[in-house]
Each structure stands twice: as C-alpha cells, then as structure tokens.
Image (cartoon, helix red, strand yellow):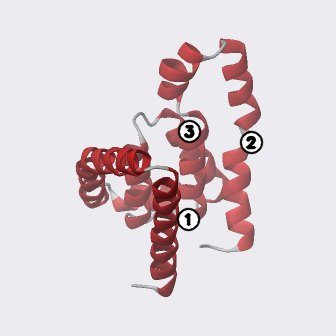
Amino acid sequence: MSITFLIVNLLLWVLVAVLALTAAVRSKALFREGATEGARDFVLLLPRIMIGVVGSGYIAAIMPQDLITTWIGPNSGILGITIATLAGAITPGGAVVGFSVGAAALKGGGGAPQVIAYSTAWSLYALTRLINWEVAMMPARVVWLRAAVSIPLPFLAGIGAMLIGHP
C-alpha cells in the first residue's frame, strides 16, 4: 500500500466522523437516519463494486492486448485519444462498468492519457445516459448544448496528460 492510499483513506474516515458528529449534535434521530441510509447504500453497492473489480480483471484478461496497445496504447497518440473518447461515449452503464472498462484497458496495455480521455468522455456524455436520463429530465436543447460544449474536454484531458507526463 502506498502512503497516498493511506492518507486518502484516513481523510475519508475523518470526513465521515465529522459528518456523523455533526448529525449527532443536531439530533439522535438524524444520526440514526444517516447511519441507516449509509449502511443500506453500502450493502447495496458493495456487491456491484466487487463484481466490477473482479469483472475488470476478466475483461483485461480476455482483451486482445496487441489490439489494446495498438489502438489505445501509450504510443497511439491523438488517434488513440480519439478512439478512447468515442469508446467512452458509447459505453453504457454506470460507474462500475465505465471505470472497470478503463481499469481493464490500463491493465491490458492502454495508455494513461487514452484512458483519461475514455473516462472523461464516459463521464461527460455517455450516449445511453444522455438519451435515457438527461433528455427525460431536462429540456433536450439544454442536454444537447451541454454535450456539445463538452466535446473538446476528453481531448483536452488526454492531450494534457500526454504533455504533463504519463501518470
């Protein structure tokens, strides 16, 4: 384990403790409600996270490494960033799917800038989420405008990662 991993975990637990203390000071009922909701979410999400992590290992194992390295590998440059961006936009599913595919691509030889472009595109404008959720809840004009102005961001993130250095 790295020191960064330990520091992040410690900070997250301190944040949870501060939030729990704040809720407890306001009322015991609020504290219990927060603990109950948090425990319920934990129980519901833990299996999904486990499946995603294990699944990403299998995805990485079955992905043809030579194709991954050729198309979105560290030496694929702007073409790899473009391919990764398009892949991010068409990847359906939630965070367990999106980040598992990104992790599998890294394990399979994908370049960090390309995977950064993939995860940025997936986060900003996964087409299934745009159509199924955003358009259903907001005016279509606003959704498509948001998606349009977001188009350069995965490219900028990937190119920025290439310029700064491989994380």
Could you tell me how many numbered marks the image carries?
3
Counting residues from the start of the chain, the first of labels 1 and 3 encountered is 3
Name the quarter where the N terminus is drawn.
bottom left
Answer with left or right where residue 31 lies relative to residue 53.
right
Task: Name the foreground residue: 72 vs 47.
Answer: 47
Residue bearing mark 2: 152
Q: Residues within 10 Å of mark 3 (few under 14, many from 20)?
A: some
First reached walking from the N terminus: tag 2 or tag 1: 1
Give the residue type that dot 3 points to: Leu
Q: Residue at x 49, y 53 (%)?
A: 23
Are discs 3 and 2 less than 8 Å apart at CB? no
Left or right position of 27 against 139 = left
The tag earlier along the polypeptide, 3 or 2, is 3
Q: To which residue does mark 1 refer?
A: 112
Residue positioned 44% across, 54% down in the render: 102
Gap in angstroms between the C-alphas marked 1 and 3: 16 Å
**Could you give the CA–CA distance between mark 2 and mark 1, rounded to whole angstroms?**
18 Å
Expressed as whole percent of the image width and height from the top left, the position of residue 94 reads 41, 39
Q: Quadrant of residue 139?
A: top right
The local secondary structure at tag 2 comes to helix
Q: Residue 4 at x, y = what percent? A: 52, 81
- At label 1, counting other C-alpha atoms closer than 10 Å, the crowd grade (few under 14, some 14-19, many 20 or more) is many
- Callout in the foreground (3, 2): 2
Q: Secondary structure at mark 3?
A: helix
Q: Quadrant of the C terminus?
A: bottom right
**Residue 147 coordinates in the image, percent (x, y):** 68, 29
Residue 40 location in percent, x, y?
A: 28, 45
Q: Amino acid at mark 1?
A: Ala
Would you identify the image quadrant in which residue 148 lies? top right
Query: Residue tagged by mark 3?
Result: 86
**Which residue type carries mark 2?**
Pro
